[in-house]
Image (tube, coloured by chain):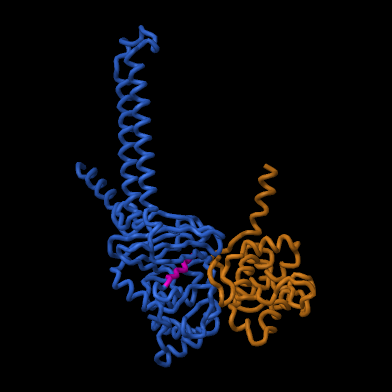
Amino acid sequence: MACAAVLATACSREAREVGVTPPQTPPVGNEDPRIAAYQDNLYQVSEGGRYFAWYGCSGCHSETPNNVVNLADSQWRYGFGFAQVYGAIAARHGRFAYGKRVPVEQLWQLTAYVRDLSSHFPEKRRRVNADQKAEPVGGSWQGPQ
Amino acid sequence: MRRVPILLAALLLGGCDGIQSVMSPAGDGAAALHDLLLLSVAVCGAIYLLVMGGLGWSLWRRRAETVSEPASEEPALDRSLWVAAAVILAGLTILIIGSFLADQALFATRGSEALQLRVTGHQYWWRIEYRDPATGRWIETANELHLPQGRTARVALGSADVIHSFWVPNVAGKIDMVPGRRNLIDLTPRRLGWFRGQCSEYCGTQHAHMAFDVKVDSPAVFDAWLMAQARPANAVAGPVAARGASVFAGPCAACHAVRGTGAGGRAGPDLTHFASRRSIAAGTLPMTRGNVQAWITQPQALKPGVPMPAVPLSPQDADAVAHYLATLR
């Protein structure tokens, strides 16, 4: 019984809210009440990881040491708050203009994913990357193998 | 009341026909499996009748005749045990031979030349690529498979995310699409017409809406279709389509490709000849102007959980994009 109860509690972090109205606007400050539904939900975080690959973010944001664009090193040039990271993705990428090209809900998911990265060991991040190995990345992708 | 059994039989037989049925084979692989199915039903049916007959016989037999003798000394029972064992062995042997022959038939074309295809499963849609026999180039489309009648098409199957399964019941058996693996299946369709394929391995929320249309054409019609698919998209004509194309170049082009324009995203289905297809969103809705616009405006309402996001567009922009897509024939 106790084991079953302990196991079941982990399920809530995987909950998939199908059909809810997604956010239409950027987060209002770092305490926006909508943040928890993304940052604390593993499904939304992992969807953020897929979009991260699809939009080709991994082309620049690798984990090589001493790289300013290493997102997993816990160093945040523009701050670690949800709204700050969101703003950095949406408005600080120059000609890529992700704020215009990426829909708002995906930006929420991407933000949650990026903020989640530094909370894991490198082994875990590598395993997640291995899971996503076959996902289409960028414009030159040639199939899963 | 006497008509009820006839009606029931007619309804059951009605399930045997159709565009997504193993009971109406239209290809070599499906025909071999159909024969194996009939053989299994015949053998298992015969065994079933024998067992039920024996059970009925033993229930109805008069008990008094046998009570006095111990069972092991009854010669009739000894004989019938041997007969039963022989019947079971014979039935299993027939099934094994049938299964072996069906297997041989499924792989009979493997050594021969064939049209090369790649099909990749994505969460809730199918990427379909043809190798142009003349140039060796890969021609990409999505969610609609065209096959030449009487010619073998060799499909290399892969997956970009989770395990899917490729199944066109009328044409061939099913085979899984496993991430990190390439599985092959040979399709040799024999009957012209439209059929339907369906993902047959649960792959997520919208597994049920992961289908595709299959069209079997005569070889000449197929070649013409493939040539048309190889061409880049139609030129933009008219102010509304031009507005649609410029809106499309923003958020849509990040994931969708329209060959011949700047749109080169690879994450979503190739839309170069989108309007030539029969349905949208992997067999979810028929291809109509209204459905396309509804899909652009609110994909999550039509197919909740699909990775395509709702892109906030003004009604005029959504209308222009739908208009533009309708010109991509």
The one of A63 and B59 positioned closer to us in this rendering: A63
Judge left or right: residue B12 versus residue A110: left
Splitting the image into 4 quarters, where does residue B75 fall? top left
> Relative to B109, does residue A30 appear above or below in the rendering?
below
Magenta-drawn segment: B124-131
Splitting the image into 4 quarters, where does residue B52 fall? top left
Splitting the image into 4 quarters, where does residue B141 fall? bottom left
Q: Position of residue A92 (x, y in %)?
A: 70, 84
Residue situated furthest left in the rendering? B2
Residue situated furthest top in the rendering? B68
Q: Position of residue A83 (x, y in %)?
A: 71, 77
> Looking at the rendering, in which quadrant would you find the N terminus of chain B?
top left
Magenta span main SS: strand
Query: Colour in which chain B is shown?
Result: blue
Query: Colour in which chain A is shown?
Result: orange
Q: Position of residue B230 (x, y in %)?
A: 41, 78
Q: Position of residue A24 (x, y in %)?
A: 59, 77
Residue in the picture at 68% in, 79% down: A89
The one of A45 and B50 positioned closer to us in this rendering: B50
The one of A39 and B229 positioned closer to us in this rendering: B229
The one of A50 and B73 positioned closer to us in this rendering: B73
Residue in the picture at 73% in, 71% down: A63
Residue in the picture at 66% in, 59% down: A13
Residue situated furthest bottom in the rendering? B239
